């Protein structure tokens, strides 16, 4: 996983730990492409900043579409009634006109107010005063999107943060099911843990299959594995099963296949430079758990550079076809079988 994503997960845990210990900052600027961390921290603040009896008079939750900077500043400068603090939350703050104007309040925040600005799908300008001032007196979290190729390692870090270990193949399968929807991964994890025996500390691929509802046997994860080993019969059978799914769409398969073959190509380049790369070198180039190294060792033998480049060209061609370009009368399931056959050819 990219260092930024690792840092984001660790920073989030630290923020949540302070909130649970009743340690609050005067301003929280939560922003970025990934809503999961923004919502997680905001919900934790709302749940812990005030007692139930204090909320009627001391909690203000509003939306950026409905408020102005002046009205939010006025609310934040009020003193709490019969409570230690008051809470002001602005959701969808990116919709506010002149959000940067909130820097006026951040220059002199009230110690008895906790102000939360949730900027979803965007970030404030880091060169300007709001970002700089909020960072000095409060908490700034930039919640960056986790990319497809990072998701399995993010899942490993997420589970580790909960005191759990997840097998690499289980993380890959869960990532295939949920994609980069971190909220969905968290929800499915909570559901699964309720069904597992108390005290379970390691999550296996069988746990994912039984509780999440995805079969490893007929998954894109398994398809890439069979392609790596050039097991034609199994790969074509998996492709037929995936293509027969009611909501199947070619782009959903093309993306992980492209990531897989791009890794093989990068691994080929590493081997050209360093015929016997170390474990650390492999990990840096492939970005996968060492559990999968054996598969990639076989894949580079089965797909030399020229063949790998040809496969990537095929993926681009079928991505275009899958999005409605020059596909003729072929259905998506037929195109997938045809693509897999050409990769193996």
Image: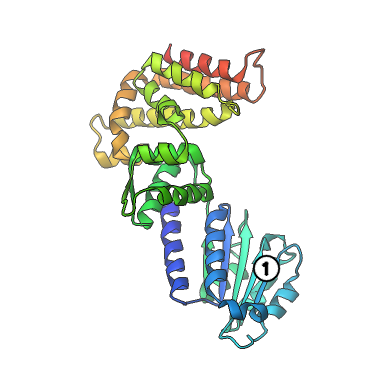
At 29% from the left and 33% from the top, the residue drawn is 293
Mark 1 neighbour class, 10 Å CA radius: few under 14, some 14 to 19, many 20 or more: some
> Is residue 263 at least partly visible in the picture?
yes
Q: Is residue 188 above or below residue 302?
A: below
Q: Is residue 217 left or right of residue 321?
A: left
Q: Is residue 288 visible?
A: no
Image quadrant holding the C terminus, namely top left
Relative to 339, residue 198 above or below? below
The image quarter in which residue 280 lies: top left
Residue 161, quarter of the rendered image: bottom left
Q: Position of residue 136 (x, y in %)?
A: 52, 74
In the depicted view, which residue is nearer to us: 332 or 132?
A: 332
| Observer-nearest of 73 and 161 | 161
- Residue drawn at the location 41% of the way across and 50% of the way down: 193
Q: Is residue 251 above or below residue 310?
A: below
Residue 94 percent location from the top left of the image: 68, 60
Tally the marks. 1
Instruction: Give the residue displayed 50% in from the left and 50% down from the top.
Output: 187
- Figure check: 236 above or below 167: above
Q: Element at badge 1? A: helix
Image-based side of 195 in relation to 60, left or right: left
x and y percentages locating residue 215 in the rendered image: 43, 31
Which residue is drawn at the image coordinates 34% and 19% (left, top)? 302
Return the residue nearer the eye: 254 or 189. Answer: 189
Per the image, the residue denoted by label 1 is 100
Q: Quadrant of residue 232?
A: top left
Give the x, y percent position of residue 23. 47, 77
């Amino acid at each position: 996983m990219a260092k930024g994503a690792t840092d984001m997960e660790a920073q989030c845990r630290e923020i949540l730990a302070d909130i649970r210990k009743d340690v609050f900052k005067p301003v929280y600027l939560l922003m970025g492409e990934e809503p999961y961390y923004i919502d997680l921290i905001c919900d934790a603040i709302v749940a812990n900043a005030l007692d139930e009896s204090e909320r009627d008079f001391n909690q203000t939750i509003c939306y950026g579409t409905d408020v102005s900077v002046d009205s939010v500043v006025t609310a934040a400068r009020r003193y709490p009634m019969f409570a230690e603090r008051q809470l002001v939350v602005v959701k969808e703050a990116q919709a506010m006109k002149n959000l940067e104007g909130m820097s006026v309040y951040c220059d002199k925040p009230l110690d008895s107010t906790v102000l939360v600005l949730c900027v979803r799908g965007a970030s404030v300008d880091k060169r300007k005063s709001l970002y700089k001032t909020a960072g000095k007196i409060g908490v700034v979290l930039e919640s960056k999107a986790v990319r497809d190729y990072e998701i399995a390692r993010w899942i490993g870090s997420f589970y580790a943060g909960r005191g759990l270990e997840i097998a690499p193949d289980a993380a890959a399968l869960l990532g295939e099911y949920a994609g980069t929807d971190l909220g969905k991964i968290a929800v499915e994890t909570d559901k699964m843990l309720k069904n597992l025996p108390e005290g379970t500390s390691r999550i296996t691929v069988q746990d994912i299959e039984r509780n999440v509802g995805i079969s490893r046997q007929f998954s894109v994860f398994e398809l890439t594995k069979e392609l790596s080993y050039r097991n034609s019969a199994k790969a074509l059978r998996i492709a037929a099963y995936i293509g027969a799914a009611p909501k199947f769409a070619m782009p959903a398969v093309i993306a992980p296949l492209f990531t897989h073959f791009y890794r093989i190509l990068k691994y080929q380049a590493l081997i050209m430079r360093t015929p016997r790369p170390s474990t650390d070198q492999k990990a840096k180039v492939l970005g996968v758990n060492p559990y999968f190294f054996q598969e990639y060792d076989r894949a580079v033998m089965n797909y030399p550079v020229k063949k790998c480049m040809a496969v990537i060209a095929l993926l681009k061609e079928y991505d275009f076809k899958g999005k409605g370009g020059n596909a003729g009368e072929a259905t998506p399931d037929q195109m997938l079988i045809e693509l897999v056959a050409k990769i193996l050819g």
